[in-house]
Image (tube, rainbow, N blue to C red):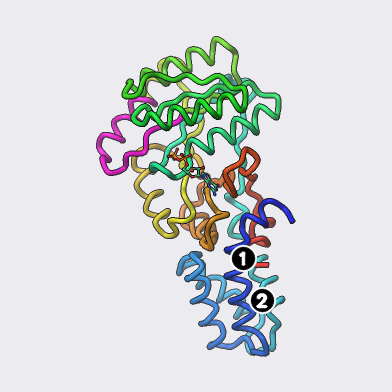
Amino acid sequence: LSRLKRGLAKSSAKLSDGITGIFTKRRLDAASLEELEELLIAADLGPSVAAKLAESLRKRRFEKDIAPEAVRGALAEDIAQILKPVAKSLTLDPAHRPHVVLVVGVNGSGKTTTIGKLAHYWTGQGKKVWLAAGDTFRAAAIEQLQIWGERTRTPVVAGASGADSAGLAFEALEKAKAANADLLLIDTAGRLHNKANLMAELAKIARVLKKLDPAAPQDCLLVLDATTGQNAIAQVETFRQIVPLTGLVVTKLDGTARGGIVVALAERFGLPVVAVGVGEGADDLRPFEAEAFAQSLVE
Ligand code: GDP
């Protein structure tokens, strides 16, 4: 069993059992399709995706006997089509060093952990990675990033708790440039309750980075906690007004039956999903592949 499939076990159990419940010895008719639509909504795929998927099934097989396996297969195909345009991994331009990634998201969404996992992945690819502890507001976040730095043998630029995050990001880019690093991952604070402050802080980080590299940050990734379900939609809405997002990372899929949120996010925003988190370990950040994800979700 792949790590992804295991990570999505709660979500797939909910959908798979639900489909079995609806379609065992049933026809694909208006009543069963309505139940399916409700199941998809309950599994966080959202009303718009649920309606589209039900409509696609209706067109294909209306008024025919259908086995649960066939419903799962058809859904997996249709979901993969929705996910395909957003399945884009992070790519580093070798001509441009370092590639700077600003990692944003509300506190507890999994930013620091995701940065540690990305550092693990990219150092494994032979890349020179630097980290910046830009969540200067919380001492615990700084410590946690330093632990990931040790674990992945990655230099961490950190200041004292309460230090100016933009100054720290500037210093980190200066050092990463001097070290000829391939990738600089910058952690940020996620105090969304003070949106104006957060906006000013992130804008200032982007501004000072541009003094050293007009193209930085090359990526701005929003980390979303899948266990928050539909709330993830609101977080994208908010953050994309604050910073120009280039991609999403959805974490904690292992702890929830709400994995369908990834499909809702894909359909709604079309933003690349660069990776998904299925556990706390270094290897638990998985590449996002449309077909594998769709199959793991419903089968
Ligand atoms: P931050 O405040 O956004 O930096 O969030 P953290 O990286 O500190 O993560 C918050 C908690 O979620 C920590 O206990 C992490 O170990 C945990 N976490 C992060 N990603 C995942 C994941 O994919 N799966 C699980 N089960 N836990 C995760």
Residue 114, quarter of picture: top right
On screen, residue 215 above or below 117: above
- Helix, strand, or loop for circle 1? helix
Mark 1, Cα crowd under 10 Å, few <14 / some 14-19 / many 20+, is many
Rendered view: 4 above or below 194: below
Q: Residue 172's spot in the image, x, y percent?
A: 47, 17
Give the percent coordinates (x, y) of residue 40: 52, 71
| Quarter of the picture holding the N terminus | bottom right
* Position of residue 294 in the picture relative to residue 172 (left or right): right
Vertical side of 212 occupied by 238: above or below: below
Residue in the picture at 60% in, 80% down: 58
Q: Residue at x 47, y 67 (%)?
A: 48
Disc 2 packing (10 Å; few <14; some 14–19; many ≥20): many
Q: Nearer the viewer, residue 99 or 257?
A: 257
Amino acid type of the residue that numbered disc 1 sits on in the rendered structure:
Ser
Q: Magenta part of the protein: which range?
A: 187-205
Q: Position of residue 143 (x, y in %)?
A: 46, 27
Where does residue 77 sit, x and y in percent of width and height? Answer: 67, 65
Q: Which of pointers 1 and 2 lies earlier in the amino acid sequence? A: 1
Q: Mark 2 = which residue? A: 71
Query: Would residue 216 be found to the left or right of residue 68 on screen?
Result: left
Q: Quadrant of residue 180?
A: top right
User: What SS does tag 2 mark?
Assistant: helix
Residue 12: numbered disc: 1
Give the image quarter of residue 298. bottom right
Please identify the quadrant where the C terminus is shown.
bottom right
Instruction: Measure the C-alpha gap from mark 1 to mark 2.
Output: 14 Å
Total marks shown come to 2
Residue furthest to the right in view is 1
Q: Which SS type dominates the magenta stretch?
A: helix
Residue at the spot 59% in from the left edge and 18% down from the top edge: 181
* Amino acid at pointer 2: Val
